[in-house]
Image: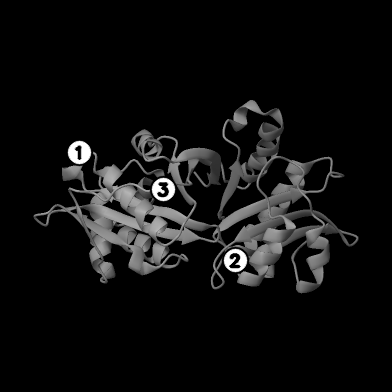
Amino acid sequence: MLFRTTTEADLGNLLDCVVEEPVSWADPDRLTAFLKDGNYTHDRIWIAEDEGKILARAVWWGFPVGGPLALDCVYVDASVTDRVTLAADLLAAAHEAFGTKPEYHVFLPSGWRDDPAVVAAVGWRREALARNGLDGTLERLRFEWTGGVPAASDRLVFSQEPDDEVFAQAFQRVAVGTLDAHTRAELAVKDAAAQARDDVAGYRSLPGDRSWWRLAHTPDGDLVGLAIASANAGGPTVGYLGVVPEHRGRGYVADLLNEITRSHAERGATRIVADTDTGNVPMAAAFERAGYRVFAVRLVTSES
């Protein structure tokens, strides 16, 4: 068995790799589009090949420049009797080359645990990941807005701020006591100021325009929070929003979310997508009150 990265000459065979299971995957349209855009690159696509036949394929997502950021697709041919072992060995080869073990993001239907086919598809992939030390899981609800533009807030003043350091300071303040699992995990291993600057850099790297970002203040100038309207390859998103600790418990989350929704709608958006952890009950409730509905689940598997 040969484990290797792919080249342009492999494209036809890569497009023949079809995942029949009910999980998200790098289908031919996505594969060709992302290869063109640079979110997929051949040095981030690994295959297990036997006598010229692709028996397994793993595809990592990232920006056009830099290393892999997330595992996007795991495929094993139906003829393989031990899918877990082959997938685990392929991932191990890639991880050794990368020098890192990126998270695996898979998108599932809501209520996926009630579907044995989805459970089985997730199960063998998670076992392969666990053999590589990725055994931590985080489940995030995927919400979408498709209409109903909220009124502007009558109690907060929203403003642009060109200075990234000011936004970093706001990120740092709203991170105190956050329920967001990713932020909490980052704060466990990073200095708070560095983590906040990384957040700013991360959102700047996305397709959304920096001019969409807003700080929220009371009429007398007290900082309440921040509202980051953003975008990804799929379109407009709710990037990030947060309230500083001293202003929590007053329903300001709704004002921030409505501002993001309004700003996207004013630019012509007809669909806005957002994620939040299943454990962040207040945020999930805020999305529902704002007219967002759950349409899927993002399951993230990472090193624990």
- Can you identify the residue that label 3 sits on? 182
Say which of 52 and 151 sits in front: 151
In the image, what residue type sits under mark 1? Arg
Helix, strand or loop status at disc 3:
helix
In the image, what residue type sits under mark 3? His
Foreground mark, 1 or 3, reads: 1
Task: Please report whichever mark, 1 or 3, sits nearer to the chain's N-terminal start.
Answer: 3
In the image, what residue type sits under mark 2? Asn
- Can you identify the residue that label 2 sits on? 39
Q: Where is residue 32 in the image (x, y as percent from the top left)?
A: 71, 65
Helix, strand or loop status at disc 2:
loop
Colour setting: one colour
Q: Quadrant of the N terminus?
A: bottom right
Foreground mark, 2 or 3, reads: 2
* Residue shown at the point (60%, 64%) measured from the top left: 98
Q: Quadrant of residue 246?
A: top left
Q: Residues within 10 Å of mark 3 (few under 14, many from 20)?
A: few
